[in-house]
């Protein structure tokens, strides 16, 4: 194998910011942030969803308010190019 062509594979702390959960895994991801976790300094990667916060794994379903998005779109663009307006009309 050729030397110096592979990225650095190292321990990294992933921080789920939605539930303040941290775990250590190995990754080649580049990051500028660092954190001290369990007495050792690691690169830090902030993530939005992990197994600790995802509804599939937790069994807790969050209702996402999507109401109003379609209405906002229709107010902005009207019936121009809308296939639903043709289907409903």
Image (spheres, rainbow, N blue to C red):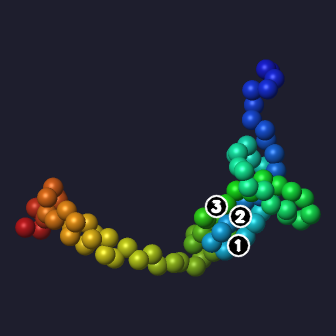
Instruction: Determine the secondary structure under disc 2.
Output: strand
| Residue corresponding to mark 1 | 20
How many residues crowd around disc 3 within 10 Å: few (fewer than 14), some, or many (20 or more)?
few
**Does the residue at mark 1 contact the one at mark 3 (Cβ under 8 Å)?**
no
Give the farthest residue toward the top. 2
Residue 42 left/right relative to 55: right
Could you say where residue 53 lies in the image, as x and y percent from the top left? 63, 71
Could you say where residue 6 lies in the image, as x and y percent from the top left? 75, 31
**Residue drawn at point x = 67 percent, y = 66 percent:** 16
Instruction: Determine the secondary structure under disc 3.
Output: strand
Could you say where residue 13 lies in the image, as x and y percent from the top left? 77, 58
The quadrant of the image that shows the N terminus is: top right
Label 2 vs 3, first from the N-terminus: 2
Label disc, if present, on residue 15 of the rendered structure? 2
Which of the 4 image quadrants contains residue 17? bottom right
Instruction: Determine the secondary structure under disc 1.
Output: loop
Residue 49 left/right relative to 40: left
**Does the residue at mark 2 contact the one at mark 3 (Cβ under 8 Å)?**
yes
**Does the residue at mark 1 contact the one at mark 2 (Cβ under 8 Å)?**
yes
**Residue drawn at point x = 46 percent, y = 79 percent:** 63
Which of the 4 image quadrants contains residue 71? bottom left
Q: CA distance from mark 2 to mark 3?
A: 6 Å
Residue 3 left/right relative to 49: right
| Residue corresponding to mark 3 | 47
């Amino acid at each position: 194998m050729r030397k110096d062509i592979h990225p650095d594979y190292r321990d990294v702390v992933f921080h789920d910011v939605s539930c303040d959960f941290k775990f250590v895994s190995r990754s080649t991801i580049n990051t500028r942030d660092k954190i001290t976790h369990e007495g050792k300094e690691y690169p830090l990667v902030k993530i939005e969803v992990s197994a600790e916060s995802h509804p599939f794994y937790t069994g807790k379903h969050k209702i996402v308010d999507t109401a109003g998005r379609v209405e906002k779109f229709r107010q902005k663009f009207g019936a121009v190019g809308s296939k639903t307006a043709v289907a409903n009309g």
